[in-house]
Amino acid sequence: MKAVGIKAAGDSSQLVLVDRKQPTLSKGELLIEVEAAGVNRTDILTRERSTPTPEQVELGIEVAGRVLDTNASDKFSVGDRVMGLVNGGGYAELAKLPADRAIPLPHALSYIEGAAIPEVFATAYQTLFWIGGLKENETVLIHAGASGVGTAAIQLAKQLKHARVIVTAGSQEKLDFCKQLGADVLINYKEENFASVISKETKTKGVDLILDFIGASYWEKNLESIAIDGRWVLIGTLGGYELSSFNISSLLQKRIQLTGTLLTPRSDSYKAKLSQELAYQTLPLFENKTLKPIVDTIFPIEKVKDAHDYMEASKNIGKIILSV
Amino acid sequence: MKAVGIKAAGDSSQLVLVDRKQPTLSKGELLIEVEAAGVNRTDILTRERSTPTPEQVELGIEVAGRVLDTNASDKFSVGDRVMGLVNGGGYAELAKLPADRAIPLPHALSYIEGAAIPEVFATAYQTLFWIGGLKENETVLIHAGASGVGTAAIQLAKQLKHARVIVTAGSQEKLDFCKQLGADVLINYKEENFASVISKETKTKGVDLILDFIGASYWEKNLESIAIDGRWVLIGTLGGYELSSFNISSLLQKRIQLTGTLLTPRSDSYKAKLSQELAYQTLPLFENKTLKPIVDTIFPIEKVKDAHDYMEASKNIGKIILSV
């Protein structure tokens, strides 16, 4: 079968289409005929860092497609349309998907749209609700509001908790899009100091929750922007990871809960529980179009290098998808 | 009535015995005839920092004594023996104690012992269970194991969750005492690198929870010592609060939850809920002596300067109490 591999750890020029053996199923895994696969930043890190056996690297952590082999699962039938998080190998014609985290694809959605859901909505759900403990009518600051996780988080925070949503992004086009999704306060970080805007907008109280993909470059402003008893979830370090100073007494004075998280390295049981809760809470809302998967661009799998280059340029609003 | 005030913000020589008016009760407050008051580090900070009206400073945040006026509360009677967290003014002959956080003093305990319970057991309970989420049989690292909160935390972690308890302290005498309370692994931080000992003792897995009173000087070693999905509760900065570098990617990679907390500035409703849950969970264990308040030294209220000096020298094992 056709799949994407790498020649060696490195930049996008290392990506290569290879011919691989069909995956061998373990107990509890479905075989999926992949129609579309999502592109994620974790794929870029895998591409850059995977040594010393690059020939074994199987890129891709989420797919949408048809069940080809149920492997004795009684929850799915051959031909079922599903989406879900895979343990690598999503950039391929065939992939193994654990049945306990396969999510039925709503009739209203295409495979392309389905591939835009699992990673970003699961990450946004986990960070907003499980880790961030977002409550009804609280205020949340979502950095990189137009990113894949950002667009999912804006919708989930508004639709499930009626939160007040403040976003940052780097262009008016991105901010306009966030507004369409329901964001209440829009900040162009290139033109305004977000901490000052937030102080004014919240009457100096600050925000109850921060979803932070940025890290070091926003650290001090995030500390200024967070409320007493605020939660701060660190899910990326696009703005660097080395702090040259940090006064930790602010953590005490504001009683901040700062949590780092990554989804991909978590256990199978964690991903199963998260997928099931996400499905339960959101499938009706995807079916009736209250929640929308946000697709920016679709690349055929043969153009995977262009897809990675496009993501690294941070030009996308929402997801980048490979069609297989 | 007799009470402790300060002449000006500053060192312990500013402490002074004053004659104050009897407190005026608000709705829901009991009047307590104070028999004993606990000394806490927060009292030292209040003494040092209270400006610009030092004459109004009322030191002391926990007491044990007899109810003198129930103020129409139907939960207590005149003469009841109680202990609890007060909103300042504990170093005095009479104090106001909100009825919804007054805890009946077990018959088996003296007033002196009662004054050694509220602040440190409530803080240890809050940090271990509410914030730290300690589960059955997990491993917890308790720094300053012989301190007031440390001695409470060792007992609560062992008795309520059968945790494996690792402590650090600065002398063999303190470590021996922690062992008597149930600590499993004893580390003299002056003689050993605690991170190395923990790596060996946990087979490189690390600890599930850290209670950190120290802050900056232990930062890197705490990062080394914590397990994946570990919780780290910062409740003091005895070792400084300025980090000169911090690689935040460790928070992501280990999925650490780092939470700063202080008890004294929290709301009345928070303290009431915490006091009630603490009473429910621990009073039978205090009554049957499974849990023990740890009293190091008792100073008459007239010697309050000596009590503060003694605390600042960090010589105590357990609590320092003022008898009134």
Image (tube, coloured by chain):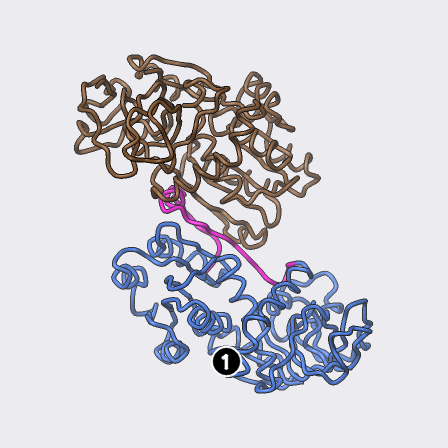
Chain colours: A brown, B blue
- Picture quadrant of residue A224: top right
Residue A95, percent from left and from top = 28, 26
Residue B48 visible: yes
Q: Nearer the viewer, residue B92 or B5?
A: B92
Quarter of the figure with the C terminus of chain A: top left
- Picture quadrant of residue B287: bottom right
Residue A98, percent from left and from top = 33, 35
- Position of residue A13 in the picture relative to residue A244 (left or right): left
Q: In the image, what residue occupies the spot 19% across and 28% down?
A: A54
* Total labels drawn: 1
Q: What segment is highlighted magenta in the picture?
A: B239-266
- Position of residue A7 in the picture relative to residue B251 (left or right): left
Residue B310 vertical placement versus B26 (above, below) = below
Residue A46 visible: no
Q: In the image, what residue occupies the spot 65% across and 77% down?
A: B63
Residue B239, percent from left and from top = 45, 61
Q: Chain of mark 1?
A: B
Q: In the image, what residue occupies the spot 34% across and 68% down?
A: B189
Q: Secondary structure at mark 1?
A: loop
Q: Is residue A276 magenta?
A: no
Residue carrying label 1: B292
The amino acid marked with disc number 1 is Lys
Q: Nearer the viewer, residue A208 or A303?
A: A303
- Position of residue A172 in the picture relative to residue B317 (left or right): right
Q: Nearer the viewer, residue B2 or A205?
A: A205
Query: How busy is the neighbourhood of tag 1: few (under 14 within 10 Å), some, or many (20 plus)?
Result: some
Residue B276 vertical placement versus B178 (above, below) = above
- Picture quadrant of residue A112: top left
Residue B256 vertical placement versus A146 (above, below) = below
Residue B210, percent from left and from top = 42, 60
Residue B304 vertical placement versus A209 (above, below) = below
